Each structure stands twice: as C-alpha cells, then as structure tokens.
Amino acid sequence: MNKTLITDTEYKKWIASLSGRYRAAQIKASVEVNRELLTFYWQLGKDINNRQNENKYGSGFMKILSRDLKEAIPEANCFSPKNLYYVRRFYLMYSEIFPQLEGISEQTKFPQLGGILYSVSWGHHKLLIDKYFNQPTVALFYLVETVKQGWSRAILLNMLDTNLHLRQGNGITNFKNLLPLPTGDLAQEMTKDPYMFDFTNLVGPYRERELKQALLKEITRFLLELGEGFAYVGREYRLKVGETEQFTDLLFYNLKLRCYVVIEVKTVKFEAAHLGQLGMYVTAVNHLLKTEQDNPTIGLLVCKTKDNVLAKYSLEGYNLPIGISEYQLSRLLPDNFKSALPTIEEIEAKLIDNDAL
C-alpha cells in the first residue's frame, strides 16, 4: 500500500501544533477529573465522619456503606472499605490544617488552597495519610513540594523515607547575610543537611574520587537530591586562573537562583582549611563564567561530618556565600539492633521445637 507524504514545512508545523494542543487538552482533562474526584472525596469523607460521630450505624458502618455504594454505583471501583477509610482520613487530616474548608460544597474548587490540594493524585494523598496523618503540617510540606517539583509517587515515597522535611534548609551558611532578599532565603532553602547519597551503593572504605564518580554515575538521582532547579555543568571544570589551571570538584547552575553553584565533596570531617580552596573556586567562577545577568556564585561544601560550632565560626570570616553540610551514604542500623536478632542456632532450635509439637 502506497503511503502519501506531505513534506510542506507549514503542514508539519501544523501537525506538531495539533499534537501539542491534544496533549495539553489531555492533561487539562486529567487535572479536571482529579479535581472533581478529590472534591467528591472531601465531601464524602466529611459525611462519613459526621455519621460515625453520631454513632447511628455501629462498628460495621464502613463495610455496610461499601456494599451499598457498590450496589448503587456498580461501575465505580473506589468504594472498598479500605478506600473509604482513606477518604475519611483525607478529610480529617486536611480539615485540621484548613478549618475554613468545613463549609465546602461539591462544586467548590478549594480556592483557599490555591489548587494545591487537588493538584496531586489520590495515590499521593494516600502515601501522606499513611505517613503523617497525625502530623498534618508535615503532610502539607510534602504536598506543596510535590506540586512545586512535580514528584511522582515513587519520588514522593523516597522523600518521605529520607525525612526531607527535617533536612531541607538546614545547611550552615552565610547566605542570608551576604545575599539580597529573596535570594538569600531561597539559597538557604536550597541546602540540605545531611544530603542522602545512599543511591551510590558505596560500602566499606572509599576515596573521594570514587564517591564523586558514583554521584555522577547516578546523576539523575544526584540532581533530585540537590533539589529544584539544578543543572549539571561539569566535573573537574577547568578554570584558567593567571598562569595556573584550577579544576572545580562539581559545577552546577541553579535556574531558580540564576547563579552558578560550586560543590566540593570531602570524605573527611570538616576543617576550616577546606573553605580556602572552595572560596578560590567561587571567586574564579565569578570572574570567568558569571555574566551580568547571573547572581553571585554560591559555594557548597559537603563533608562526611562536621562540628557545627566550628563551621559557623569559620564562615564568619568569609565574604563569599558558602554553605556547609554533611552527607550520609545510608541510614545505619542502631548499635543494639544486631544483638536483638536471633542467632542461627536459636532459629534452628526453634524450628526443631515446632516440629516436635
């Protein structure tokens, strides 16, 4: 069968435009469906909670409600007792944060939340309910970050596992003193302490070069851990300084802050002398790479461990914006965990005892 081709440039542009408009329409429709579903869940959760508080139907109310809803709406598959349990907790968790939503109707589009509540999927909400039902403000932190950064459920789960809310913005820095508002606050929020480098899968003794190689091998996950807006520029980036060549550890550009970020990774405890090398790199990037449109270059020193007091004192003597953080390769088991595990002999003895019964 002959295939007729139209090679006209304007026609091809039209086809590309149609493709883009169709995909945009699909996304819009998906967002609208999600909004309507969550609006329905909010009202349903409120109704369930009110009826349970009235205690008219006994302890088996969820199972009865599930059965009756399935009979009334057989084409729906969202009325299992388990999902109804989530629906009720969805309402309870967020109504604690936003009591003004108490009077919400099915047609209301959550204007008080600026669209945040219904901008993520039901699966995202269930993860947050499981983890932080009793800490709704923490759940809201992850909800906002999910919307800002477009996290999938898998990424959200990873961030929950690494306790991002306890790490974000915790680096020791001089950003707020040296950078203008709001850049200083944004730069501080960019930091984490500690950074989680467990995706490198390094175990046992390792050298700095091996850690840096492992970080770049998993560059996508490394950028995700660094946070929003980071773009990779290069490793051991060459800087011609006078008659010498200098090579930065890792060079990035942050699109949100509109500045270069020089990152030095040290596999030892922080020492004040580390700042001298990093400060020289920051100065060199300002002279050689920074343009008039860029904000001042930021330095970030990531060490195996640090003395926080020493780090703070060391930064007071610097007029360059620098942050200091730690990193972790994995979350270690507590010291007494291994001793709490049964030995092979104890397991075998237990099996023998069970066989004898």
Image (cartoon, rainbow, N blue to C red):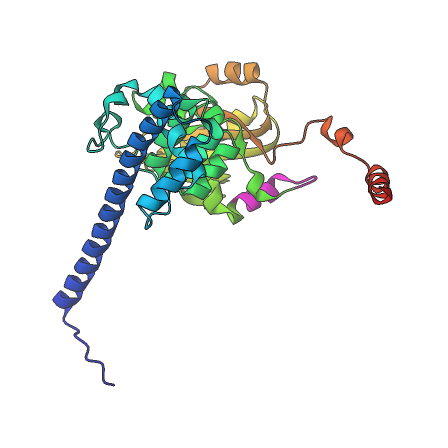
Q: How many marks?
A: 0
Residue in front for this viewpoint, 304 or 177: 304
Q: x, y percentage for residue 223?
A: 44, 41
Q: x, y percentage for residue 276?
A: 51, 26
For the point 29% across and 42% down, the residue is 34
**Quarter of the figure with residue 295:** top left
Residue 239 seen in render: no
Quadrant (top left/top right/bottom left/bottom right) for the C terminus: top right
Residue in front for this viewpoint, 123 or 243: 123
What secondary structure characterizes most of the magenta part? helix
For the point 78% across and 29% down, the residue is 339
Residue in front for this viewpoint, 345 or 172: 345
For the point 48% across and 46% down, the residue is 219
Q: x, y percentage for residue 114?
A: 24, 29
Q: Is residue 254 above or below residue 173?
A: below
**Residue 154: in magenta span:** no
Horizontal arrangement in the rendering, residue 199 relative to residue 288 (left or right): right
Residue 54 seen in render: yes
Q: Report the residue that reaches farthest toward the bottom.
A: 1
**Quarter of the figure with residue 179:** top left
Horizontal arrangement in the rendering, residue 173 relative to residue 144 (left or right): right
Horizontal arrangement in the rendering, residue 151 relative to residue 106 (left or right): right
For the point 55% across and 37% down, the residue is 197
Residue segment shown in magenta: 203-215
Quadrant (top left/top right/bottom left/bottom right) for the N terminus: bottom left
**Quarter of the figure with residue 88:** top left
Q: x, y percentage for residue 337?
A: 72, 29
**Residue 206: in magenta span:** yes
